[in-house]
Amino acid sequence: MVLIPVSVKTAKGVGIAALTKDKFRVFEDGVEQDIALFEMPGQPITVAIVIDMSDSAKLSLAEMRKAASAFIDKLESRDKALIVAFDKNIHRVLGATNDRDVLKLGLLGISSGGGTALYDVVDDVLRTSFKNVSGRKAVILLTDGIDTSSTKATFETSASIAGENNIAIFPIQYEPENLATKPVSPGTYREGLSIYTTPSGETISSAYQRGTRYLRLLSDSSGGRFQFADSAKKLRSAFEQIAAELRQQYYLGFYPERSASKREKRKLNVTVDVPGAKIESRESYIALP
């Protein structure tokens, strides 16, 4: 079954609740599919909070902890969360629990480190963190999007895993500390201008732009939402918006009528019979043979 998280909002961004199954239509590559699963908003959910703890962030780790802690307070009693942190290594801080105090203590155990194995952690969380977890699942990924240390996964392989799974990913991207607004090539180098690069020699600015593309791809193919936060205030707001989004999502599921002979990306489209409504939903998925 392919799952599609769907938010339906008014033109002013207010969630529309209590819609019935007959109001929705689902299309795969333009062909309408039968809706086999329909779930109303407000169902329990398990959320993986994944935090980039590399020491190159503009936002402080204390600000990240505070925003994540406020998000935990917004979870309902039936919801669960787990915590994963990463630098050049992956640190499984805490398994899924609905104990808010334990979750907050887990956040306090995170400390800054070196390197960023972003692609590895996305691959690992999607493959292992939700084993034996039923119901709705989501990932909140807090990172600058720059990978410097992955050894097992790549941009392409980890993005593909995101498209194959029914786990919504909500990336929150912040700027790295040494982001150059105008990268300068060696030929136009001026004395006194610092050019910050990754260990591979790529400019931070170029790596950051690729990170933005990567994070947007994760959200579009999984049914989550990409957000940008360049301050502690915007970070708190991003977590608040995600909490509200998770509470108001419908879940639609269908079994593809067309089988796949090879791995292929298929476009998804959801419509709703509500005049003037705005829909946010998963845009694609990877079909497997």
Image: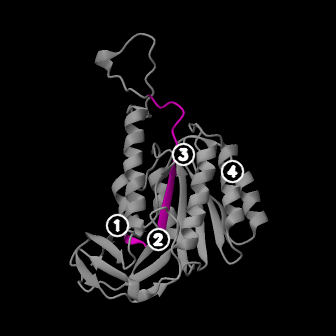
Choose top left, top right, bottom left or bottom right for residue 244. Answer: bottom right
Q: Is residue 73 above or below residue 137?
A: above
- The residue that disc 4 covers is 65
Work out whether 226 lies above or below 138: above
Residue 277: quarter of image: bottom left
Q: Which residue type carries mark 2?
A: Ser
Q: Report the residue at 66% width, 44% height from top.
A: 61
| Magenta highlight range | 164-180
**Residues packed near mark 3 inside 10 Å, few (<14), some (14 to 19) or many (20 plus):** many
Residue linked to disc 3: 229
Q: Is residue 43 visible?
A: yes
What's the CA distance linking mark 1 and mark 4? 31 Å
Q: Amino acid at mark 3?
A: Ala
Which residue position is annotated with label 2? Answer: 7
- Residue 179 magenta: yes
- The amino acid type found where label 4 is placed reads Arg
**Dot 1 amino acid type:** Glu
Task: From the viewer's side, name the closer residue of 288 and 215.
Answer: 215
